[in-house]
Image (cartoon, rainbow, N blue to C red):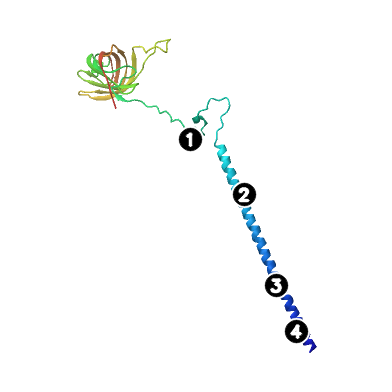
Amino acid sequence: MNTIVFHKTAFGVLSLAAVAVLGGGMPAVAENLDTISTQQLTQISKTEEQANTQAVSNSAHETVSSIVIPTPGTVETSSAALAPQTSESTSQTAAPNVAQADIGIGTTTRGGSSYIGVAANIGLSGGDSALGDGNFMIISKIGFTRAFSVRPSAVLGDDTVFLIPVSYDFSFQQLGDPLSEALPIAPYVGAGAAIKTGGDSQVSLLLSGGVDVPLNSQFTANAAVNAAFFDETDIGLSIGVGYNFGGFGI
């Protein structure tokens, strides 16, 4: 009996002790939770303060760096000179200059104006065509750049020959004075085709060379040697005069 009473008493004491422990522990847990929450809020507040301080510092640095302070002793004191320069203004590149050649039918070359005229042909060699005999000629010069021209002509006779050379025109400076005007004489050399008509028609290589001498604004004198390589080589010397005309560009 006494044993049962003792057990009941012990159980009751243990129950009171457990209640006391539990009752005392709940405020402690709550206090610990409050302490943790306060520390976290304090840490978040400090982090936000640091972020705001850094943002203000960066903004102030950018503002200061964008201001150009004039250097003492310089003359650039206008607002345009003190304004910050963008990278676009310093990275401009010059467009390369592209050389272009003006092309025009009948343009004036270095040797003078284009012209059409008449000449006398003197046969020097051959005789297979009109080029190798003494005959009448129609001559011309048609410039298409400053250096190049085509000089179609016709030697009239029993076996008429058409000459179509493309020539390169020169211009000479007076000796010893490179700054002086060019001499009033313009040599040229050329090559092309010679076309012989008649019963024995042929097309052959033509070599040509001569000189133009401007007489005035209206007339140009010409002397040339033409060689056509037919079955036998025909060579003729022509002397004539042409009437100058202006060109029309394309």
Q: Is residue 79 visible?
A: yes
Q: Which residue is mark 2?
A: 50
Instruction: Give the left or right position of residue 205, taking residue 41 as reference.
Output: left
Circle 1 residues within 10 Å: few <14, some 14–19, many ≥20: few
Mark 3 secondary-structure assignment? helix
Question: Which of the 4 image quadrants contains residue 204?
Answer: top left
The mark closer to the camera, 4 or 1, is 4
- Residue sitting at x 68%, y 64%: 32
- Who comes first in sequence, dot 1 or dot 3? 3
Q: Compared to 209, does 101 lie above or below? A: below
- Residue sitting at x 66%, y 64%: 33
- Who comes first in sequence, dot 2 or dot 3? 3
Q: CA distance from mark 4 to mark 3?
A: 22 Å
Q: Which residue is mark 3?
A: 23
Mark 2 secondary-structure assignment? helix
Q: Which residue is mark 4?
A: 8
Instruction: Give the left or right position of residue 197, taking residue 27 as reference.
Output: left
Q: Compared to 191, does 14 lie above or below? A: below
Circle 4 residues within 10 Å: few <14, some 14–19, many ≥20: few
Q: Which mark is residue 88?
A: 1
Residues at circles 4 and 1 in contact by the CB criterion of under 8 Å:
no
Instruction: Locate the N terminus and report the quarter of the image it occupies.
Output: bottom right
Q: Where residue 124 appears, x then y in whole percent?
A: 28, 13
- Who comes first in sequence, dot 4 or dot 1? 4
